[in-house]
Image (cartoon, rainbow, N blue to C red):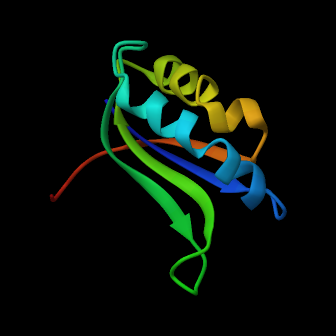
Amino acid sequence: MLFAIHALDKADALPVRLANYDAHKAYLEDSTRLPVTIVMSGPLVSDDGATMIGSLFLVEAPGRAEAEAFNRADPFAAAGIWERVTITGFFRRKG
């Protein structure tokens, strides 16, 4: 099943995000930890088109529990940068 993970940063999280960016990217590159496949992912940005303000993932997972575990294990989650995370099932119609 596909899940959209929408994570918005805390207002002052950019320095912490940048400090943990390499660990976050390394985590996303190692797909052997959990039974989750990243379909696509990337930072959410402010209206200036450059300032990172959150993260968006589209993942394929056996169920919600695995998608939640994937999100909890992310170094960004451990660093506490996200103010709000929403995980929603997704049904692909196009693309």
Q: Position of residue 35 (x, y in %)?
A: 35, 15
Q: Residue furthest right?
A: 12
In the image, what residue occupies the spot 69% across and 34% down?
Answer: 77
Using the image, determine if residue 89 lies above or below residue 43: above
Q: Residue furthest left?
A: 95
Q: Which residue is at the front of the view, 17 or 11?
A: 17
**Quarter the N terminus occupies:** top left
Using the image, determine if residue 11 lies above or below residue 49: above
Q: Position of residue 30 (x, y in %)?
A: 37, 22
In the image, what residue occupies the spot 58% across and 30% down?
Answer: 74
Q: Which residue is at the front of the view, 11 or 62?
A: 11
Q: Position of residue 75 (x, y in %)?
A: 63, 31
Q: Position of residue 12 (x, y in %)?
A: 84, 62
Q: Which residue is at the front of the view, 46 or 16?
A: 16
| Location of residue 58 by image quarter | top left
In the image, what residue occupies the spot 42% across and 33% down?
Answer: 28
In the image, what residue occupies the spot 66% across and 45% down?
Answer: 85
Q: Residue furthest bottom?
A: 48
Using the image, determine if residue 70 lies above or below residue 15: above
Q: Is residue 34 left or right of residue 9?
A: left
Q: Is residue 14 left or right of residue 69?
A: right
Using the image, determine if residue 18 lies above or below residue 73: below
**Quarter the C terminus occupies:** bottom left
| Location of residue 14 by image quarter | bottom right
Q: Is residue 74 left or right of residue 1?
A: right
Total labels: the figure holds 0
